């Protein structure tokens, strides 16, 4: 196989009470990435979108991830990565993780699956570090594995797949900028033990609820007493969006990753659409441009779009 | 039915990474409690053991729990509770919870199951408050329900049963005194966010491991970076007991409740007995009196010993 085209999905990290450890993969939006082997050793990056992302591999998230993978190979190879980014950078739904994870997953397909998923996560974390300054895997893991994933530990890396019941996800992306690094900086380094206890009760409840398909428990557990109260002030109308979404029947939700997108989980598409309507209404009246998605959980992660095999150059 | 005799099991609270929210019930030791209806309204407590616990109902953990249940009844009743306590008070394996939960569970059997398990937990928490100064349910819930329980929230009370795979539990009780209130007081009110993140990664991993019967994940998740480093200094030879238990093949473990007992989980009885041997050896050489238990998880909670029905007085 000399070329491969993949969908690399958007992801929602944190999942309210699982800051830095939980994430889920979405069926929409997805980046489209094409990777081709070339006869010239080295890496070429081409962007088809108009986000103005750098094409210099060492400054590009997919580039850094691929270079990290290529460094682990016994000999130099040539690759050309063409990226059609659909997940807006800075949206909070894992745009950089889709580049990082998608690129290494595509390379692994081309190379005949020589790397494990855990190794791919390791390579992709180098790309995430370029994007946010921190090696984190809470978007990369669900992007690669699909479903809901728990990063029990980063050092050593321990990824636990958690099978969720069917869930609909509504996302609103208010078009304002929240930098991941800023969103991280406003967090307090110290927290109250009593708040931490409440939070670990909730994440334990959420994991049990997801694994048992207990929607009411999922709903009760989607509570964040630590991060959301601080970060939500960076997102205009957050409280209103959340309240109206819950009133419309959402199980719960909150900030997607470090924002500004807000996600809500619902048990069916009808409720998920009502939630979308409420979200849109809030930002419409606030005069803030926005986009919305109604989608489901992607249980496969990165997937091959076609298996067209092009002729080698 | 005019009288009932029950076993009320010992319990291990916290389970390393689940401070204040997780607990499990043991098949051994168990208190033996006999509850009898009498014709004189009011409550009489009798202790068969020699622990010197108060028999005045308002000063006795079982008494306070029962009075709280009796206050919820439409009319006064007469009860006589005889307690043969096998779980040493102050051992850290839920002695007060066994009194609190056992007494109300017995009363509920006599009354024809008029209360829900959640109501029983509420009544029993009043007894726990007498014992430790804090209304907590992490021993009471597993004592009443069996298995592993998660207290997702105390206000409002939300108990999540978690079905564990077969596990052996080894416990060593070094005969020193650690007061729950002291063990609570030495904890810092503030903790590092990064430690809390590691802790909630671990509790999420432990819940997933228990529910999936994944012993390796259970083992990796039995890590406490917050409470154990502080509290373990109150328990002589803690580090040595832990290291030798793990070397003997235990999956993991730590302080039982607020100590001084230490518990370890193992996948089979042979390993659990080796762990017992190591624990005993440490305290034997340290010249500290101790007792040990090798048991399994009690999946039923409080259970009726016999259904002898005595004649009403």
Image (cartoon, coloured by chain):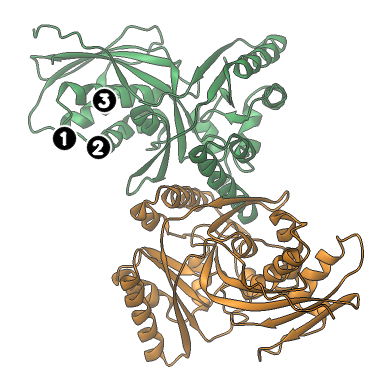
Chain colours: A green, B orange
Q: CA distance from mark 1 to mark 2?
A: 10 Å
Q: Residue at x 64, y 25 (%)?
A: A250
Picture quarter containing residue B302?
Answer: bottom right
At which x and y percent is residue A239?
70, 27
Q: Residue at x 72, y 24 (%)?
A: A247
- Which of the two labelled residues, at mark 3 and mark 1, occupies the earlier sequence position? 1
Letter of the chain that mark 1 sits on in the rendering: A
- Quarter of the picture containing the N terminus of chain B is bottom right
Q: Is residue A119 above or below residue A174?
A: below
Question: Badge 3: how crowded within 10 Å, few (<14), some, or many (20+)?
Answer: many
- Which of the two labelled residues, at mark 3 and mark 2, occupies the earlier sequence position? 3
Disc 3 to disc 1: CB gap under 8 Å: no
Q: Is residue A194 visible?
A: yes
Q: Which residue is mark 2?
A: A119
Query: Are discs 1 and 2 both within one chain?
Result: yes
Specify whether A85 is left or right of B305.
left
Disc 1 to disc 2: CB gap under 8 Å: yes
- What is the secondary structure assignment of the residue under circle 2? helix
Specify whether A296 is left or right of A198.
left
Q: Is residue A61 visible?
A: no
Picture quarter containing residue B11?
Answer: bottom right
Say which of A245 and B183 sits in front: A245
Q: Which residue is mark 3?
A: A105
Q: CA distance from mark 3 to mark 2?
A: 10 Å
Say which of A35 and A56 sits in front: A35
Q: Nearer the viewer, mark 3 or mark 1?
A: 3
What label sits on residue B22 in the rendered view?
Answer: none
């Amino acid at each position: 196989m000399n070329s491969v085209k993949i969908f690399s999905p958007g992801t929602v990290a944190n999942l309210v009470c699982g800051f830095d450890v939980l994430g889920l993969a979405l069926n929409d939006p997805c980046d489209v990435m094409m990777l081709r082997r070339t006869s010239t050793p080295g890496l070429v990056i081409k962007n088809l979108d108009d986000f103005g992302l750098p094409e210099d591999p060492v400054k590009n998230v997919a580039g850094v991830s691929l270079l990290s993978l290529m460094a682990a190979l016994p000999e130099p190879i040539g690759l050309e990565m063409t990226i059609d980014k659909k997940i807006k950078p800075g949206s909070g739904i894992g745009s950089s993780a889709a580049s990082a994870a998608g690129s290494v997953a595509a390379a692994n397909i081309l190379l005949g699956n020589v790397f494990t998923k855990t190794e791919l996560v390791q390579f992709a974390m180098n790309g995430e570090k370029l994007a946010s300054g921190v090696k984190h895997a809470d978007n990369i893991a669900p992007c690669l594995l699909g479903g809901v994933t728990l990063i029990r530990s980063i050092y050593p890396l321990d990824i636990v797949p958690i099978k969720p019941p069917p869930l609909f996800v509504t996302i609103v992306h208010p078009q304002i900028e929240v930098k991941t690094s800023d969103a991280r900086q406003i967090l307090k380094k110290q927290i109250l033990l009593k708040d931490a206890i409440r939070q670990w009760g909730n994440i334990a409840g959420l994991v049990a609820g997801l694994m048992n398909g207990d929607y009411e428990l999922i709903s009760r557990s989607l509570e964040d007493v630590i991060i959301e109260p601080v970060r939500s002030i960076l997102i205009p109308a957050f409280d209103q969006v959340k309240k109206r979404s819950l009133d419309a029947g959402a199980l719960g939700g909150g900030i997607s990753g470090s924002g500004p997108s807000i996600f809500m989980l619902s048990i069916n598409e009808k409720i998920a659409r009502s939630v979308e309507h409420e979200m849109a209404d809030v930002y419409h009246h606030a005069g803030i441009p926005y986009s919305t998605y109604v989608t489901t959980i992607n249980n496969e992660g990165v997937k091959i779009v076609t298996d067209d095999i092009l002729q080698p150059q």
